Amino acid sequence: NHYGRNFIDLFVTVNTFLGQQSGSIITITMDVTYVDNNLKSDGNSEITEESKHNESVDLKMKGVIFPGNKWIKYWDMLICLFLFILLFTSPYRIGVTSISDQLDSVTRLTFSTLTDFIFIIDTILYFWRAYREPDGRLVFDLKKIRRHYLRTFFVWNLLGSIPSAIIFAGQMTPEEDFSLEAIIVSRVFDLLKLFRLARVPYFLRSSDFVVQFQQNQKSQAKLALVKYTFLLIVASHLLACSWCFLAFVQAGNFGDGLLERNNWILFWYNNNYEEGMINPIGEGQNLDRYILSMFWSIQTITSIGYGNISPFTRLEWWFGSIFMLLSGVLWAYIIGSLVGVAAALQVENELHRNRIDEVNVMISQFAKSDPTKANYACEQEMYDTDIFAKRLKKFIHSQKMSHKLSAVNDMRGSFPVINSLSPEMQRVSCFMLVREHLELVPYLSSRFLSMHERSRVAKECMVLDFPPGETIRMSEDDSSIGRGIFVMIRGTAFAAHGSVKSFSQRRKKAFVITVGHVFGAGEVLLSEGNVQSEGRIEVISFTRVLFIPRRAVLAALE
């Protein structure tokens, strides 16, 4: 009874969750071959108890919105867009523009109202959205969801959704006619919208749309580079708007007040302004004020400091010092992060340079060749120190150009991350890497073998690189690579079936193989000692092949 109830708990939970995710319910048919006598005696009461429990589970999950829901992913994309816009527009409205500029523009008023409406809906939706605990566990109990939301982001989301544009929409007068209290209130309402940004880190961690976008990027180093560049742009923007807002606080408006009260804009204006240049004075000069503030912000963050824009009043010196301190910390963090990103982007080049250094050290230890001891001209060329050293370096360079840093590797050697996966995931990963090449071998294709059988073959496969002029022999002696199937991935080569003992035999039997060709699929099935089971490949250009060992082929066909 105990284990039966546990199973039903698990089944109901998984069943309801999958039904919420995909709209389908799993049906499990159980063939009971043994029933305990105690269970027979009170079976009706047990069934009633389980039915009540199932109904309580369904009630807890009724109406829950799961992260994998298709429509909630689209909603998250929309919220991402509006948060991105809010990140730039809200500080700009607070620090750079005047109230009348915001209210006079029908487009700005409409967009601001739409943004408030979207955020109000998002605030309400979170009462039904399942969330994940720090340990990754999904919580889908409605009571727990709502308690968690009320304790965390509800207040911030509510404050960030107040429709300030509608509140001030009826006041279509110049800013000088506004009372100081009305100006402060309007700025406070705009500032409250920034509270929405407080949950951005949580949103980036919990949204399936954001997580999947990060996972789909081929290079995490390049994604990090974009992230830190974006962080620098956002920090510059916020600092610029704050610096401009500081002048507004002291002047009271962006009109004549900037020329009547001391502030950094007045100081710059008296020392640098000329007719036709940037003019930050006036309600309609928003862009000029922003450019001037952004120039100060960038030179402060990057520690350049031209000195043509500087604090003037006591308040500006205080805030300027704080801004510079914060900018120094931010700049140090970004520089350190970018150095790490640059190093990650150069990993392949660094490995290549190390490989070349290792080759040069090895070549310096080579014994000098003695041409008089070579029996044949081909041996003299193959074992000549200088010629072989050139071949080595050219081979390493070819590997680098083809983005492969190892010559002989199985799938786990080529992709070390496979070693950290479970056994089943290792087989599937190997299969995904070589699926199209296995399909070229008729009896290893999907027509004859299951996915599981082919994944076992894929796990034994190796990717081999060969330089021009190298000969690959298929036999069981110590000087060959062994018997198996060669699938050409890159390059061109001559191939010949059976043993080749003379130049005339080579000329008659040899044929050209290139990308997509399979060699050895028949020979690998022949018994040991059969002459036809041998073969050879003579590489013409830098060649990469997928080698499928004979043991893996025979194991799959047993």
Image (tube, rainbow, N blue to C red):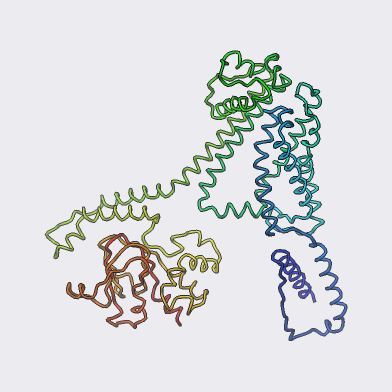
* Left or right: 334 in relation to 130: left
Q: Is residue 229 above or below residue 262?
A: below
**Can see residue 479?**
no
Image vertical order of residue 540 relative to residue 260, above or below: below
Residue 149's x, y, as percent?
78, 49
Residue 29, given in percent of the width and then of the height, sits at: 72, 80
> Which of the 4 image quarters holds residue 240?
top right
Q: Quadrant of the N terminus?
A: bottom right
For this rendering, which residue is in front, 265 or 136?
Answer: 265
Label total for image: 0
Q: Quadrant of residue 555?
A: bottom left
Instruction: From the viewer's perspective, tell me whether residue 212 is left or right of residue 545.
Output: right
Residue found 69% across the figure and 32% down from its top:
93
Q: Is residue 209 above or below residue 314?
A: below
Instruction: Report the residue at 50% width, 44% height from top.
Output: 341
Tell me where residue 460 appears, x and y as whole percent. Answer: 44, 70
* Side of 128 where 528 appears, left or right: left
Residue 534 at least partly seen: yes
Q: Is 173 or 244 nearer to us in this picture?
A: 173
Q: Residue 6, position in %: x, y?
A: 76, 71
Considering depth in this image, is 297 or 471 the residue closer to the camera? 297
